[in-house]
Amino acid sequence: MSEAVLYDVQGPRARRRVLIGSIFGALFVGLLVLLAVRRLAANGQFAGELYEPFVSEPDLYRRLGTGLLNTLRAAGYALVLALLLGTLLAFGRLSSRAWLRAPAVAVIEFFRGVPLLLLILFFFLAFPLAFGIDLPPLYALVFGLTLYNGAVIAEIIRAGVLSLPKGQTEAAVAIGLRRGQTLRLVLLPQALRIMLPALVSQLVVLLKDTSLGFVIGFEELLRIGGQAVQVLDNPIQLYVLIALIYITLNVGLGRLAGYLEGRQRKTYGPDLPSQKVEESGLGQVSAAP
Amino acid sequence: MDAVLDNLDVFVEGFTTTLSLTLLAAAGALILGTLLAAMRVSPVPPLRWFATLYVQAVRNTPLTVVFFLVVFGLPEVGVIVSFYRFAVVALTIYTAAFVAEAVRSGINSVASGQAEASRSIGMTFSQTLRLVVLPQAFANIVPPLASIFIALLKNTSIAYAFGVFEATQAMNRLINDNGSDVIAIIAAAALAYLLLALLAAALFSRLERAVRPA
């Protein structure tokens, strides 16, 4: 449904009212911007030396590039591992055997319900103290991300499998496939395709969460930015730049998810199987903050 | 295990702060998010653009970056308050973008006849939204709001890195004092978070049953 239903096609009087509203709206937004700019100017935030490093320090971009590469590396490793773990957990939860299903449900619910930072700190703090193994920060970050995203991806895959028509399972059983074969050969490939947009959206969450690496001293984009701020003393300018880098990457991924969804609409029509899953409450598919 | 039981008061203090952070930021995000959603569906283009820009920018920024901008950026322009207040501000700014998206999808889920009927009896846009559409929209979006606020509860743990004594900070202090019991301490903290999340989920599902349209 479009949003235009909240107001009518505008006649001359409504157009005039909207115009007046637009002027006041623009004034309101402009006032906010003006206040921000005045505040920034009053505190010398437009002084040249705060922006000068962006031009005069090519080294800054080399450092940020290294950070970005580390961010992408952590996200890439975590994505691969989380897909593996998620598939395993989804199989467990969809299994007909209760002794497989129960632990899978427990694991999924536990890792979804605990703060990600706690999982990362577990690998970073508990491993050296309790087992005498020092995990490098990259590993601690990747393992923490894997547990959380694996649990979420398991739910996405399960929702995808449940959204498939019953005939798929029945046909597989009819030609003599076992339960495991049915899942692996018939249901999983289709579920992954149906849930591809949801998986890409989850990738945005994963990429954002790699920034938690700064807590344990992993040199990803944000931590490198923090180090640069210590030297350059321009937190607002530098953190805005870093936010813009994240926004660019994530908007790109969001576009990709939208494109994939659009392609599916061509295949399945306006009612996507993944949306039906969401509405029926079988699985929580949309990415949480 | 002893390290946990002997220091229960530290945990309780930490989780009290976690809860108050969550509740304050949830209230702030609900207000700001609803305002942004109303701006996004309004007939006034500048307000729509502003709200869309806000939601898109904030949703695609990591919460940690929002924290950095608030904690290190605001003092640069003369705003100096406690880390606790900075944390509430950062969590509110971030969560509001997700609330706005949920409210907007709730508004879109209200049957168009509702808005048409209110217009036909002469209500203005803001009356239509306030008295007819929003109450029904909120009744429809209790489940997504629940998952947003549960995520907020978990996200408060990031305040630990910015000097707020909340649950994760409490856990960290206990680990520093009792290195040998590290697994028990982390497990206790994890279970407490889980318990709070389950409690919130139960409360929200009761709320959903209470407001569900008959």
Image (cartoon, coloured by chain):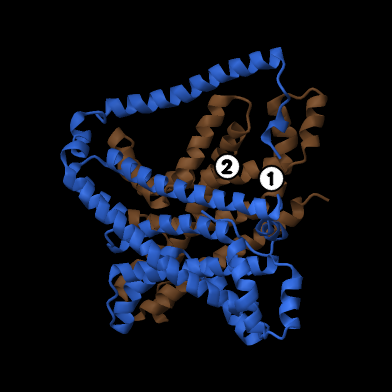
Chain colours: A blue, B brown
Q: Is residue B115 above or below residue B57?
A: above
Give the quadrant of residue B136. top right
The three-letter amino acid code for the residue at tag 2 is Ala
Which quadrant of the figure contains the N terminus of chain B?
bottom left
Please report the residue visible at 70 percent of the width from the left and 26 percent of the height from the top.
Answer: B125
Q: Is residue B8 above or below residue B134?
A: below
The spot of residue A109 in percent (x, y) is 57, 71
**Numbered disc 1: what chain?**
B
Q: Is residue A234 left or right of residue A202?
A: left
Please report the residue visible at 21 percent of the width from the left and 29 percent of the height from the top.
Answer: A47
* Label tally: 2
The spot of residue A198 in percent (x, y) is 56, 58
Q: Nearer the viewer, residue B38 or A267?
A: A267
Circle 2 residue: B100
Q: Residues within 10 Å of mark 1 (few under 14, many from 20)?
A: many
Q: Residues within 10 Å of mark 2 (few under 14, many from 20)?
A: many
Q: Are marks 1 and 2 in contact (CB under 8 Å)?
A: no
